[in-house]
Image (spheres, rainbow, N blue to C red):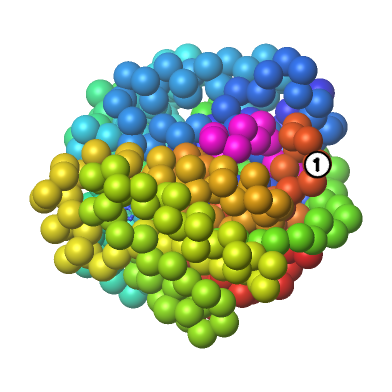
Amino acid sequence: MTLALGCIADDYTGASDLANTLTRAGLRTVQTIGVPADDLALPEVDAVVVSLKSRSIEAGLAVSRSRAAEAWLRGRGASRVLFKICSTFDSTDAGNIGPVMDALRADSGEGTVLVTPAFPETGRTVYQGNLFVGAVPLNESPLKDHPLNPMHDSSLVRVLARQSKTQIGLVDLATVTRGADAVRARLAELAGKGIGAAIIDAVFDRDLETIGLVAAEHRLSVGASGIGLGLARALVSTGKVKSAAGSSETGAAVGGPAACLAGSCSQATLQQIASAEKVMPVLHLDPDRILTGAGEAQRALDWAKPRLAEGPVLIASSSTPDQVAALQARHGRDAAGHAIEQAMADIAEGLVKSGVRRLVIAGGETSGAVVDRLRIPGFLVGVEIAAGVPVLRAVGIEGDMLLALKSGNFGGPEFFSDALGLMR
Ligand SMILES: Nc1ncnc2c1ncn2[C@@H]1O[C@H](COP(=O)(O)OP(=O)(O)OP(=O)(O)O)[C@@H](O)[C@H]1O
Ligand SMILES: O=C(O)[C@@H](O)C(=O)CO
């Protein structure tokens, strides 16, 4: 297998978002959980997305895990590697995007790395280096209240400069609009000044197509699904990959009980939970009881099991920003996040033992904890539920299982029933 594109994603939902984008753009793609074991049978593909759970861990560890993934991908012939980050650039000032980018840049001998989290389909655009989420700058968006990495600066040039050892430049929209040669010239100018990475503006998919043509000539790029789209379209349009569009996985129906778990506290997920209350039983976990070890996961399982035969259920830890802040004040941010993630993994494990083979999970860290606990080594990409969220079919486990790993902010108000409707 010689990969046209190797990808390293810093969380599992982001990886499935990227795998979905690449698949829709015509690349045969598989998502793996971590660096695959030698005995994992992978189909013949154009792209592999190695999912890590490295967004919120200590930078040194994120660097070493990302490098291991890079070495595996390069070993499978990937001359281009995309480091997939969140479209809302989730990270703290001590965060991992800069250190991982610096390390991968050193490994790959890249001059100036192209960086853009733009993903116009989901409302993420970048102008003059500032990230917009819908109509508002990042720092005015709901991301200002994120439980793990609140975002307070919309200037990605500044954010990345605080994390990286290299200087950060800008390729502005006017340059992108002039086409690939203008971008190449600007990058050459920045490289001449020793600037090791540049935020690139992108507002429309056509900007990402221009960026993709240039990124396809580089060994390393950093960004969200938008740059993945640009890269995939460039690989197809330049004949480096023969398009396999429309060939996403369509396996047999799985059936049986279905459940949803929500650990994301994003506004989108809170609204989706409220909508789900109208069509399925919903249990709201008590986060304090999780933190004090009061058997909350078992209570949830006792609640869910008798209901599963009647139809899907939803179990949510999600709370409003005020409630999240209060819980974190009582227990500490990381301790609260970790304990709730592990409780979600306990619940998922119990549900699967009770026969659940269709599972919808909201939140990247939450999905990471659950998928790790279920020991799923990889996924094939199925139909799209919402922008950035495909149905996934697990590979490398006994029996069939369908999952949807929803990024916190993605999906429409009826996401949970939309997903279950497509996960037969
Ligand atoms: N009620 C709560 N109070 C405090 N923290 C919570 C609560 N419920 C969940 N959490 C924690 O908040 C974090 C949510 O992160 P997660 O990545 O799952 O969602 P997200 O950030 O919205 O999604 P994504 O990363 O896909 O955008 C997790 O660590 C989770 O355990
Ligand atoms: O890019 C995004 O917004 C998502 O794929 C994601 O990474 C959220 O965790």
Residue 399 figure quarter: top right
Outermost residue toward the right in this view = 252
Residue 33 figure quarter: top right
Image quadrant holding the N terminus, namely top right
Amino acid type at circle 1 is Gly
Apparent side of residue 269 relative to residue 288 in the rendered image (left or right): right
Q: Which residues are magenta?
A: 371-380
Apparent side of residue 188 relative to residue 225 in the rendered image (left or right): left
Local crowd at mark 1 within 10 Å, few (<14), some, or many (≥20)? few
Q: Is residue 83 visible?
A: no
Outermost residue toward the bottom in this view = 278
Q: Is residue 360 visible?
A: yes
Image quadrant holding the C terminus, namely bottom right
- Residue underneath mark 1: 399
301 lies above or below 242 = below
Q: Is residue 28 magenta?
A: no
Query: Helix or strand or loop: what does disc 1 sit on?
Result: loop
**Foreground pick, 141 / 346:** 346
**Foreground pick, 309 / 373:** 309
